[in-house]
Image (cartoon, rainbow, N blue to C red):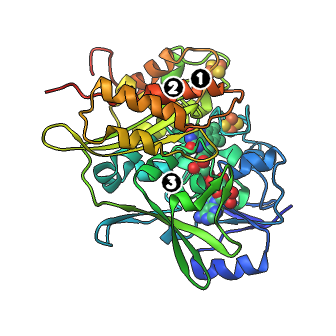
Amino acid sequence: MILHFTLNGQATRVECDPDRRVVDLLRQDLGLTGVKEACGAGECGACAILLDGVPRLSCLLLAAQLAGHEVLTIEGLAGGEAPHPLQEAFARAGAVQCGFCTPGMVLASHALLARQPRPSRQEIAQAIAGNLCRCTGYHKIIDAVRLAAGLSEDDS
Amino acid sequence: MRPVLLPASLEELWPLMRDHPGAAFMAGGSDLLVRLRQGLVDPPAIIGLEGIAELGLVHDEAPGWLFLGAGASHTALLEHSLVQRRLPLLAQALAVLGSPLVRNQGTLGGNLGTASPAGDTLSPLYALEAQVELRSATGSRRLAIADFILGPGRTALQAGEIIYGAWVPLAQDWSLAHFEKVGLRQALAIAVVSLAALISLDDGGVVREARLALGSVGPTVVRPRQAEQALLGRPLDAASLKAAARLVRQEVSPIDDPRASAHYRRQVAGNLLLRLARPAD
Ligand SMILES: Cc1cc2nc3c(=O)[nH]c(=O)nc-3n(C[C@H](O)[C@H](O)[C@H](O)COP(=O)(O)OP(=O)(O)OC[C@H]3O[C@@H](n4cnc5c(N)ncnc54)[C@H](O)[C@@H]3O)c2cc1C
Ligand code: FES
Ligand code: FES
C-alpha cells in the first residue's frame, strides 16, 4: 500500500505492506533507528513512539494504522540540531547509561510533561512504569524529568 | 502480506466482515499482535476497529445504566469522569492493568474478547453484574457477562458479531468497592489472583449485600456464592471475613502454572478477603 502520514512534522509517503510492524517500518524502511526493539511484545517500552501525542508501542502497531496520523519519534523531538530540554536534562542528570531505554523514556516523559508540567516523583514513576531500564535503577531518570520540568528536590 | 482493513463506521464494517470470513478483529492489538507474532493465530485478514468512533463512547443516557464502548482504551476509561465517579471498582482495576503504554493501546473490548482468566476488567464486571452487548449487521443482543465468557479464550461471540460494549447497572451505591491483584511484580504484572468486591452495609455496619469475584483462580472468573452468603447479616470484621475466606478457598478451582501453584492461589484468594475488614467506628 501507499501510506501517507506525518512523521516528525514532515508529510511522508512510503510504500509498504499494510501489516508491516511500525517498528520495522520506522527502523528498517525509514532509517529511524532511535526507535528500539527489545521484547517485541509490549513489555519493555523501548519501541515507544508518540502517535497523535500519545505514547504507543510501535512493536504492536501495523503500518496501515498510521494512515493520516502524526508520528513523533525521538529523532523529531528536538526539531533541530540543539537537543530538546528533556534530552539535555537526561544527559545532565546522568540518566543515560547504555541508552537503549532512553528514546522511549524521553518520549513517555515528554507526553507526561505535556499533560502535567509539574509532576511529582511518584507521577513520573507511574508514567514510565511501562518503560524498562536495566541500567539506571530509575532514580536518575526521575531526577532528569524533574530537572527538565524546572523542579528542584525541595519542591513537591 | 495480509490485508489490514480499517472501516470508519459500522456501516462500512458489516460488508467487510462478509467479504473477509475468518478475519481477526483488532482493537488495540495488544493481545492479537502478540499472539500473531508467537504464531498462535494466522488470520487471512485483520479488521481494525479503531476508526469506528461510536465504539469509543462512554455514556449514562439510559437511566440506571452506564455504557462503556468496546473500543474505549483503558486509559480513556480510567480518565473518564463517569468511570471515576460511578465505577470506582473498575477504575481501581484499570489503574493496575499492564502499564501506561499497554493501557493506551488496550481496550475493554479486547479484554473481553481475549477472555483470559487473568483479564483485569473481568472480575469487576462480574461483581457489577454487567452485560455485554453484541452487534451484527442484523441486530443486537445483550448477555450477562457470565454467559458471554465461556472459558479461557472462549466467548459466546458468533460469526458476524462484534462486541459493541458493556452495560453496567448503576442501581446501587456500594459502601465499599475494592479491587486488588496479586502479581509477581508491581508494574506489568499478570494477576496470580485478583479480587473484586462490592459490599453494601446498613447504618449499623452490617452487611446487606456482598458480591465477590475472583480472577485467575479458575477457567473463568469465580463468584464464590457461599462466601457471599456467609457475610450477609454480619459486620465486616475479622471473624466474619475469616469464615468467608475459608469458603472462598473451597469454592475456587485454581491450576498450577509457571506463575504460581494452585495451593498458593487458593491461600491468597482467601487472604485477599481479609483486606476488606473495616475498623469498627
Ligand atoms: C505487556 C502486556 C501487559 C499486559 N498486561 C495486562 C494486565 O495486566 N491485565 C490484563 O487484563 N491484560 C493485560 N494485557 C493484555 C491486553 O493488553 C488486554 O487484554 C487488552 O485489554 C486487550 O485489548 P486490545 O484492544 O489490545 O485487544 P486486541 O489484541 O485488539 O484484541 C484481543 C482479542 O479480542 C478480539 N476483539 C477485540 N475487540 C473486539 C470487538 N469489539 N469485538 C469482537 N472481538 C474483539 C480480537 O479479535 C482479539 O481476539 C497485557 C498485554 C501486554 C502486551
Ligand atoms: S519492543 Fe515494543 S515493548 Fe518491547
Ligand atoms: S540506560 Fe540501559 S536500559 Fe536504561
Q: Secondary structure at mark 3?
A: loop
Q: Is residue B146 visible?
A: yes
In the rendered view, would you say B85 is above or below A82? below
Q: What type is the residue that disc 2 sits on?
A: Val
Image coordinates for residue B255, horizontal then vertical, percent: 67, 33
| Residue A49 can be seen in this image | no
Where residue A87 appears, as percent x and y from the top left, is 53, 28
Q: Identify the image quadrant of the N terminus of chain B.
A: bottom right
Image quadrant in which the C terminus of chain B is located:
top left
Judged from the image, the secondary structure of the residue bearing numbered disc 2 is: helix
Q: Badge 1 is on which residue?
A: B264
Real-space Cα distance between discs 1 and 2?
6 Å
Chain that bears disc 3: B
Seen at 18% across and 37% down, the residue is B205
Q: Quadrant of residue B112?
A: bottom right
Q: Position of residue A28 (x, y in %)?
A: 81, 44
Whether ligand 1 has any atom under 8 Å from the Cβ at mark 3 is answered as yes
Q: Residue at x 26, y 47 (%)?
A: B174
For marks 3 and 2 on the same chain, the one whose residue lies earlier in the sequence? 3
Disc 1 is placed on an element classified as helix
Is disc 2 on the same chain as disc 3?
A: yes
**For residue B34, side relative to residue B52 (left or right):** right
The correct choice, above or below, for B12 with respect to A142 in the image is: below
Q: CA distance from mark 3 to mark 1?
A: 32 Å
Residue position marked by numbered label 3 in the rendering: B73
Say which residue label 2 marks: B268
Residue at 46% from the left image edge and 48% from the top image edge? B75
